Image (cartoon, coloured by chain):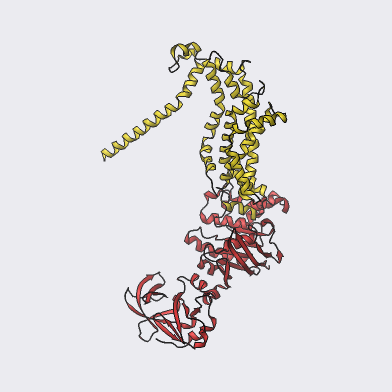
Chain colours: A red, B yellow
Amino acid sequence: MRGTPVKLEGVTKRFRNVVAVCNLKLEISGGELLVLLGPSGCGKTTTLRVVAGLEIPDEGRVYIDNTDVTYLEPGERGVAMVFQDYALYPHMTAFDNIAFPLKVRAKRLRLSKRDIEERVLRVAKMLGIESLLDRKPTQLSGGQQQRVALARALVTEPRVWLMDEPLSNLDALIRLQVRAELKKLQKDLGITTIYVTHDQVEALSLADRVAVMNAGRIVQVGTPREVYENPQHIFVATFIGAPPMNIVKCKVSNNLIECPGFVKRIPGEKLQGLNTIHIGIRPEHIELTRREESDIEGVVYVVEPLGAEYIINVLIDKDTLIKVKTIREVQLSTGDKVYLRVDWKKAVAFDPATGQTLADLLPTLKGEGSR
Amino acid sequence: MIKTTTKKLIKTILINAVIWALALLWVLPFIGLALVSLMPYRGVIVRGWLRLPSLDSLSFKNFIEALANPLYDMATGYRNSVIVASASTILPLISAALAAYAFTYLDFRLKAMLFGLIIVIMMVPQQLVVVPLFFLYNYLRLYNTIPGIVLLHSAWGVAWSTFFLRNYFKFIPKSLVDAARVFGASDFQIFRKIVMPLSIPGIIAATVLQFTWVWNDLFYALTFLVSKENQVLTQKLVMLKGEYHIDWGLLTAGSIITMSMPLILYIAFNKYFMRGVAGWGVRR
């Protein structure tokens, strides 16, 4: 079965004089799981609500299955939504909650009582909650409530699934379990899904593609790998990754990039008009060595052991702190002198004024350089 | 250790004593009313009202007299009061619930202005508009009719109960309504299946408030209901007080008959009543 494509075309939504979403363009292909990722207030939930029909955009169009649905009622769009707080009806049993979308449309869909019962049971069985159907939401655990909410969003056989931080109210352990189940379910059913979260780990683990949003705009869309390895904006680089990318503020003079703690030589004409650049290095692309010939000298500020890995905070300058991630066991303590070897092939340079990635600078960074 | 526990005990006893004393003071007038209404008139005059009466002297004579004697005819008043108060509660609450839904969940032009208007109406004293209303009612031939006074009380009730219920609805998480909308429920379905069941305490609180307000009303009743067969209980109660002589037994019996309905409502619904207070807190 081919899923339903969704397309947003130049969508703008304002609340009074606050622009929540600005000229947003997005295409989601059938059966794809797209994650809208961004900090709170970036407009990701508003975007989702526009697709759901709960908000009418001020400008732009929304297409579901190549049909313009911009001004269609939410109930006529063939979408289903899972809410952050699950939005289960406290006065109804789990069964009635799941049956609700069918009951309100029973006449239109010509469903008999038995049809409804059959479909509710089928979905409940799929999610393993058939034994909980006569309970009220308050008698269910967080994970069970979540399943009921999922079942309710499945029972109408929607074309598009919309999820607004559905896992954020769950305990950390259950969240991991449900996350995997959710991904499996989505892949099995092939329902086009738009998933909103501010949790970058969740985004990377679930998504076919991630759309990183900031201040009402999409900053970058790509597969989790692309977004992680080739951030096109300093915002993406610093938002994704745990810990995020190290950003070193460097001065440019002639054909030298002078960074705190190290200097790199590059052909001068590539940096015309720039006085400063930011260099981004992922913590796992830095290696700790004790050998002198390594690139950068620094002093251990603090070591954070995380079980399987270590985060070592290194001061390479008075006020430049670099985070290094390693899976090797380290025996370092505050004040120790260390040498950092950077994998320059994976470093990124950003224009400090616009935040954009300076793509043409990358090869030059990869060249030789020394202090 | 022992010292602190005894201290605690003394504190508990003291607090209890104060609370009981206050409670007693609070119910004393009612106990007085009950005693006087049950005792023979002579006994009250000669020996005072605050005493334990002998059981065989107690009688319901005063109650029967107040209800059945055509001179006082509180039975008719009771019937009229039930009709007026019930109708003047059901009508405005249905429209107020619908209006409050619109004010909470729908967007329409002049919404803020209309809501402001409701608050303004809530602030208008009833006495201020009674004269023009009197002329209007006369002109519309609604003067001295039960539907007329029901309409009047309903009009006043709609304003505050819309405000009250709208505030109550604001406590329902918005996602519940959003979810219903995404699942294709119509506004009326959302109103009936989600919002109404979840605001039962608020609805009951508003019902009790409006009902007792109308039940206790004397001002509009005196102005708009004149004929004996249309008069409500509060009007009948006033007439129990003679011009030259007060039959305390009769008057207290009448008072208790009049109070009975609000009293029963408060006792039956006091749980909801407390929860319904939420309706007065404004939420944006």
Percent coordinates x, y for residue A316 in the rendering: 38, 78
Please, is residue B179 above or below residue B47 in the view? below
Please, is residue A189 above or below residue B28 in the view? below
Decide which of B239, A82 is in the foreground and name it: B239
Percent coordinates x, y for residue B162 in the rendering: 61, 42
Percent coordinates x, y for residue A4 in the rendering: 67, 66
Residue at 52% from the left image edge and 49% from the top image edge: A139
Decide if residue A254 is in sight here.
Answer: yes
Please, is residue B183 above or below residue A249 in the view? above
- Position of the N terminus of chain B, as image quadrant, is top left
Left or right: residue B276 compared with residue B94: left
Decide which of A112, A274 is in the foreground and name it: A274
Percent coordinates x, y for residue A339 in the rendering: 37, 81
* Marker count (numbered): 0
Q: Quadrant of residue A127?
A: bottom right
Residue at 58% from the left image edge and 42% from the top image edge: B119
Residue at 67% from the left image edge and 64% from the top image edge: A62
Decide if residue A190 is in sight here.
Answer: no
Decide which of A287, A123 is in the foreground and name it: A287
Decide which of B248, A155 is in the foreground and name it: B248
